[in-house]
Amino acid sequence: MIPESFIQDMLARVDIIDLINKYVPLKKAGANYMACCPFHSEKTPSFTVSPVKQFYHCFGCGAHGTAIGFLMEYQGMGFVDAVKELAASIGMQVPETRDHVGGAEQSGRLRRLSERMSEAHVFYKAALKKSERAIAYLKKRGLSGEVAARFGMGYAPEGWQALQAVFTDYASLEMLETGLVIDGDNGRRYDRFRDRIMFPIISARGEVIGFGGRVLEEGDPKYLNSPETPLFEKGRELFGLPQARQALRDENCAIVVEGYLDVIALAQHGVGNAVATLGTATTSTHVQKLLRQADRVVFCFDGDAAGRKAAAKALDNALESLADNKALAFAFLPEPEDPDSFIRKAGKAAFTRLIAQATPLSDFLLREVSARCDLTTSEGKARLI
């Protein structure tokens, strides 16, 4: 637990005007500063920031809070991460408690792992520019260089130890902890990702914490993700969230899809508020994170049996995150389409219409539960209730 005295001392040193102005241009208005609210769409500024009270408030949507609250809402951070981010920005170090013995050492270890992931990302991006085959594949998928750059896409070259050219300590334990390499049964170390299009997974703090890799043609597995590491927990992270933040606020809606290329294809066609889970079912943490940034979440799945199964799992995990002012819905694509193929064939307007007409959670819940009960009998009806 972070001591309350530290939090108050930190807030006294942070200038909320400087903080918010990095994300939202503020204009002086008397004793306060004003802007159009970053948490809902508006044309007339109703978002005010007080330099005296070190507090923000929107008279339109009611959003309000301190510098910590702003980072949590705007960046989708948890409380502890927001405190650490603010503390680091003013040169303060969050005190370690007895419950966090060795906290400084752990922090240093995480920083070194993060640096390695960043170096690998630079290598993969450079490799993409050199690979005509990888570039041809992306063009065949209809992706532009602009959208590839926006999502930081790269390419893991063929060969078993390409990363050895980047890391002089390729054989170290920390390299293994990043998940970038694997130790085989014969004791030989090799790169986890080989001959794959690479998608960096970015944390709320803007750091590369993992990767997803897709084969260029046919292969098994089609997608390969980083394993869980000290940096990366797939049940907590969403691909494309940093790139989607502005669109999430503009649309007040988040679209959850299953694949990296679905997110990128949607973004290229003007649907920027989509994110993807990372090779796992949607978790309650995913839902909570998205509901901090939008009032409506739509789960968009393929219309096949696998898509409906994934939707049912998302339903189960979303129920605990429901709130009166939030809405969850489910959209199913016609077989055999996925979001990538659907928007390329049908266009943005058709996809947007599909999302707008998504089945509300209450209807989907009743449909799912009813399918498990025999409603021709009193016992089945009782079970449904």
Image: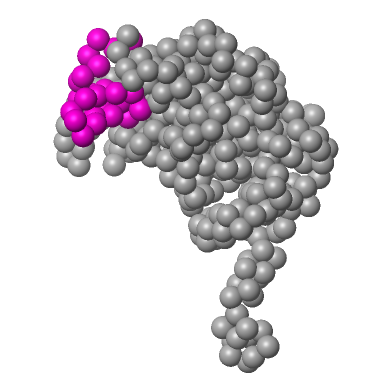
Dividing the picture into quarters, in which one does residue 149 lie? Answer: top right
Q: Give 329 or 192, whichever is nearer the viewer.
A: 192
User: Which residue is painted at 61% across and 42% down in the image?
Assistant: 257
The single residue placed furthest to the front in the displayed view is: 218
Figure check: 136 above or below 280: above
Residue range in magenta is: 166-192
Residue 5 seen: no
Q: Tell me if 94 is positioned left or right of 289 in this view.
A: left
Q: Position of residue 53 (x, y in %)?
A: 53, 29
Image quadrant containing the C terminus: bottom right
User: Which residue is painted at 16% across and 36% down in the image?
Assistant: 101
Q: Position of residue 206 (x, y in %)?
A: 47, 23
The single residue placed furthest to the bottom in the displayed view is: 378
Q: Give 246 or 4, whichever is nearer the viewer.
A: 246
In the image, residue 169 lies in the stretch drawn in magenta: yes
Q: Give 347 or 113, whichever is nearer the viewer.
A: 347
Q: Give 147 or 317, whichever is nearer the viewer.
A: 147
User: Which residue is painted at 65% across and 55% down in the image?
Assistant: 304
